[in-house]
Image (cartoon, helix red, strand yellow):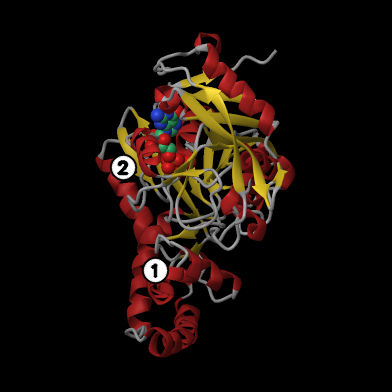
Amino acid sequence: MVQAIVGANWGDEGKGKITDMLAEKADIIIRFQGGANAGHTIVNDYGKFALHTLPSGVFYDHTTSIIGNGVALNIPVLFKELNSIIEKGVPKPKLLVSDRAQMVMPYHVLFDAYEEERLAGKSFGSTKSGIAPFYSDKYAKIGFQVSELFDEASLKEKIERVIATKNVLLEHLYHKPLLDADELFDTLMEYRTMVEPYVCDVSAYLYDAIKEGKNILLEGQLGSLKDPDHGIYPMVTSSSTLAAYGAIGAGLPPYEIKDIVTVVKAYSSAVGAGAFVSEIFGDEADELRKRGGDGGEYGATTGRPRRMGWFDCVATRYGCRIQGTTQVAFTVLDVLGYLDEIPVCVGYEIDGEVVKDFPVTSKLEKAKPVLKTMPGWKTDIRGITEYEQLPENCRKYIEFIEGEIGFPITMVSNGPKRSDIIYRKKD
Ligand code: GDP
């Protein structure tokens, strides 16, 4: 069975924890999009980890971790991460890298930084991991697949051709040092040495795995609202964050994705620029940021403070719908235990009219939140394992949100650890 774990919002919903937890019963976990620009934070018996490239299932010795063709693969970052988890005592993971995955080149990272510098105040808030230049090149058909590392003559010729245009930009637009073909070739040969033992025809591997009845998890990065088509364009990421793209970014038939677990956080947070209707500021935001997640809402990759907001029913209903949600994992609920009252955004007021459907970006920028206030529960809910044991106001909060978003909340996460999970009994 193939199951996707994806985010409904701006990312950082706690997908890593849910993936790590569901991976216990999985055989294969695949990253199908994105790169090392965002991270998942995972807390388990081996310690606390911030993963950027490896799938969140790498901590079990029965799982195979796969970097799918849809990923922006930064080879040195991948191997640094692999070594760092092994150093912390995690058994060496079984890793496969798609021969069709394309590589983040050293110049993608440079171009990302140069472009943000050029845009100055109008920048997109990129993490400067090279992701946008990488995907631009992929679709401009000047990217490099892992498989190309094994044909040296063609590789040399292509490097010359590709860097000729890059060097024009470097010289005349960015006024930065030029790229050297021999140096780049040598770097790519180092990448080849690192990746060679792991290279695999992933779609063929998955075809067999599905036939054998293996359990496969597709692990998404970021969330619906960062999708380049359905998100808050242009303040989005450069690859699709939707479960549907899992079929393409892993290389398996779309009809095999039977279960779409959409991860939804009990309040909102976002990184980077872009409209964020339920955003809060000042002390109110600082308090939630400090208490949020596990040790505060700060970027797993960049360490930068996340923007904070109340739960947004409009954005989340849309985010769940566009994912094709079959069930919702509702996370980080324990954090809200300090509040007397909890505001929830239930509508957007745009030009004097209240809407419940998530609008296109131009309208979104004009939206003001319509808030409803729910009573808080003022207790620590960590350690609770049965839904009925949650305080009544806490259950009311969950059930109100479930009604608003229109998808079943089947899991409630009340702490960062694998075991901090409440499975809700279905009637
Ligand atoms: P991801 O990118 O969707 O995997 O999310 P992040 O890893 O960026 O953010 C989730 C943060 O919340 C991490 O620090 C997790 O350890 C933490 N976390 C996940 N679930 C829970 C939860 O239920 N309660 C608390 N307090 N923290 C959680």
Q: Which residue is mark 1?
A: 109
Give the amino acid type for the residue marked by disc 2 in the picture: Ile
The correct choice, above or below, for 365 with respect to 26 in the image is below
Residue projecting furthest to the front: 352
In which quadrant of this rendering is ligand 1 seen?
top left
Q: How far apart are labels 1 and 2 at the CA level?
A: 24 Å
Q: Quadrant of residue 381?
A: top left
Of residues 192 and 230, the one nearer the viewer is: 230
Q: Which residue is mark 2?
A: 85
Please state the horizontal and vertical placement of residue 139, each as a whole percent of the image.
60, 71
Q: Nearer the viewer, residue 58 or 50?
A: 50
Q: Is residue 253 left or right of residue 240?
A: right
Q: Position of residue 161 (x, y in %)?
A: 49, 86
Rendered position, 22 above or below 399: below
Q: Nearer the viewer, mark 1 or mark 2?
A: 1
Badge 1 element:
helix
Viewer-proximal residue, 270 or 147? Answer: 270
Q: Earlier in the sequence, mark 1 or mark 2?
A: 2
The picture quadrant where one finds residue 129 is bottom left
Please state, as top left, top right, bottom left or bottom right, where the C terminus lies in the image. top right
Badge 1: residue crowd in 10 Å (few <14, some 14–19, many ≥20): some
The answer to whether any part of residue 61 appears in the image is no
- Examine the rendered structure and indicate whether residue 363 appears above or below residue 335: below
